[in-house]
Image (cartoon, rainbow, N blue to C red):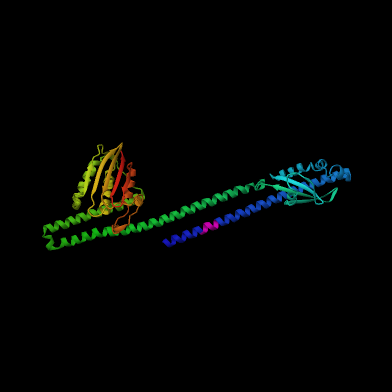
Amino acid sequence: MNIKFNILIVLSVIALFFAIASQYVWTQKTYDIIRSNQKNLINLSITKSADEFTRYISEKHLQFGDSLNFVQCDHSPGHTHACFADFDSILDREFGNNNLKCNVEYAFIFEDSIIFKSKNEITDSSYKSSEFVHKLYCGIFSTGLTLHIIADCPLLSTGADNHLDGWLVLGVISMLLITIILIFFIRLIRKIQKTSKERIKVINNMAHEFKTPISSINLASEMLAKEEVSKDTARVKRYADLISFENTRLKFLGDQILQIAMLEEQQISLNFSSLDANEVIKTYVENYMEVRLELRGRINLQLEANNPFIQADKGHFENVIKNLIENAIKYGGEDVLIVVSTGNIGQNLLIIVSDNGVGIPKSYHKKIFERFYRIIDGNQHDIKGFGIGLYYIRSILNKMNGKISLDSSPGKGAKFTITIKQ
């Protein structure tokens, strides 16, 4: 299963790479087309402008003859300007007709000499090396008048290409969405992988957890079936107590499995009622120690809350206390001592379950409240469990307007503090 997931992730990444690459190539080609179209429009505008100006110069030549060269178009600044004054308006009109918003400067060169330039600040060499060049054969310039144009046009300045801008933006947004979806998809697969592994561990732990009490009950039943045992009242009672104890363990395990299922399906419903937390905790712990005789003297109560009343579900509230006590016994180490205390702070009821056990490193403080998470550390690796207890506690307390926190460090025990609004 893991191999299939990894192959799927690799294929998804490769697909995303090719999608991004193709989008990049498409974008570059699109811009190349836009630039080419823009250049063609500029050339078209210049050609039309040059043709119209050619007709203008030809008409002037027919009207005034060669004297135009000396009267209006000689090399003196004032006369030359008079000859080329109308080209600005012609050029602006043609660029406007093609929706080109460009900053245009130009120069006319005759016999390798610039006879007019629109902006004197621009060097002659810049004009002569310009991209757009057009020849005019007209009137007194029949041997060839060269028009050099410097056009500074922002990309997508033409109305014909404006729609492509929207497609490019849409393409970028689409790629971003695809990337986000793929990242989410990969994270989801990783989460499924992790959950799958956790479920397998839980199933294995369930098998081991059920195996011990079932074996004990089976052994006790076989012993009770023997005639010599059935006549010994003390041994009958001992085996009956063992069966009762293991049956209680099975019920607890079954309840945990039910809790897992209900939490998974979010089907836990609470029946709220007013509870005296001190009384519920006291009654539960006393009954618990009646079954776990070996724990007598190791669970101490300090129920000092002046206002112990809360709105909660009694069954789930007892399960919260039971899970915390069971965890302290299971993970606290041999001969662990447990203290269950209550108190008030403001409008809140405090319930503290502390022990003097091995403690929990701070690096685990947040993780232990995650579903199926179990600490596998040191000599605790043989301790079985489902990794659901603290996740269940936190989930139930959230529903009962409460929260839980942990204060612990290695070798200094653990203190779980429950805060419930009253």
Quarter holding residue 302: top left
Quadrant including the N terminus: bottom left
Magenta stretch encompasses residue 405: no
* Residue drawn at 71 percent across, 47 percent down: 151
* Residue drawn at 86 percent across, 45 percent down: 69
Q: Is residue 344 visible?
A: yes
Q: Main secondary structure of the magenta part?
A: helix
Task: Looking at the picture, tell me which residue is in the foreground, 40 or 71.
Answer: 71
Picture coordinates of residue 185, whole percent (x, y): 46, 54
308, above or below 389, in the image:
above
Q: Is residue 274 visible?
A: no
In the picture, measured across the screen, residue 48 lies left or right of residue 356, that is: right
Picture coordinates of residue 34, whole percent (x, y): 65, 51
Magenta stretch encompasses residue 16: yes
Quadrant including the C terminus: top left
In the picture, measured across the screen, residue 286 lies left or right of residue 392, that is: left
In the picture, measured across the screen, residue 171 lies left or right of residue 330, that is: right
- First to last magenta residue range: 14-19
